[in-house]
Amino acid sequence: MSIFWFITTLLLLHSCTPGVGMDHGIVNGKVSVPHSHPYMVYIRDSQTQAACGGFLIREDFVITAAHCNGKHLMVYLGVDDTNRLPEGIPVLAIPHPDFVNKQGYDDIMLLKLKTIATLNKNVKIIGLPKTKGEAFPSNCMAMGWGWKEYTHMSPSNVLREVNLTLIQNCATPDLICTRGTAGPARGDSGSPLICGKVPHGIVSYLLPESSGYITMYTKISHYLQWIHDTMKPSF
């Protein structure tokens, strides 16, 4: 557990520290066409300025990483350049009940919007995997507003993306992984890993190795029952 906590603290779990939230990019990626990923959500704590990514799965729910939780979270929809943010929407944060900070497992959280999103050409919903064992392609894409370099600040302000290939034999059944010198970095926590136009992973943490980094993503299909149960209307 200690190596997971050390790496997560170093690179992703505290990607959302004060003063870091406006450092945006993807390592060795490219600038996304503006509003080409209308499900993307920018998340920021209104007091600490801590920032993460997320994605809209219903007019009233966003998915992100549980380690992005904060006391004053706001979501911003239809964002391209974070220097020009729309009005933020406050949320109710619902982290997975088994998530334990400093361990890196069950790193998934739902955010219930206190004002329902207005869908338009720049704000759209993305569908989830259908079943827990659903097969999906290994060619995927990550995107987000994190650093453009792994080890130092490299602000971009605009959404960036990168193509990635999944590796086999990831650490545990509830994770999927990519490896190399390209991908998410500090500030990209909570952003989706899109495979075949479907979000199959949530950016969680990194592990360094001699040839680059292994990026760990929470496997969304592993948590479908919890997601659907949590989003059920309460009467």
Image (cartoon, rainbow, N blue to C red):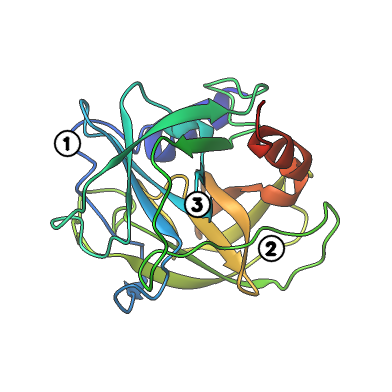
81 up-or-down from 185: above or below: below
Question: How far is disc 1 from disc 2 in space, using C-alphas?
Answer: 33 Å
Q: Residue 21 in the image: state x and y as whole percent.
A: 24, 42
Give the foreground label among 1 and 2: 1
Residue behind mark 3: 59
The numbered dot on residue 88 is none
Residue 105 located left or right of residue 185: right
Three-letter amino acid code of the residue under disc 3: Glu
Would you identify the image quadrant in which residue 223 lies? top right
In percent of the image, x 23 and y 48: which residue is there? 152
Would you identify the image quadrant in which residue 159 lies? bottom left
Residue behind mark 2: 167
Can residue 210 be spotted in the picture?
Answer: no
Question: How far is disc 3 from disc 1 in space, using C-alphas?
Answer: 30 Å
Q: Quadrant of the N terminus?
A: top right
- Residue sitting farthest toward the bottom: 33
* Residue in the foreground of this view, choosing between 32 and 130: 130
Give the foreground label among 3 and 1: 3
Three-letter amino acid code of the residue under disc 2: Ile
Q: Residue 153 in the image: state x and y as whole percent.
A: 20, 49
Helix, strand or loop status at disc 1: loop
31 up-or-down from 170: above or below: below
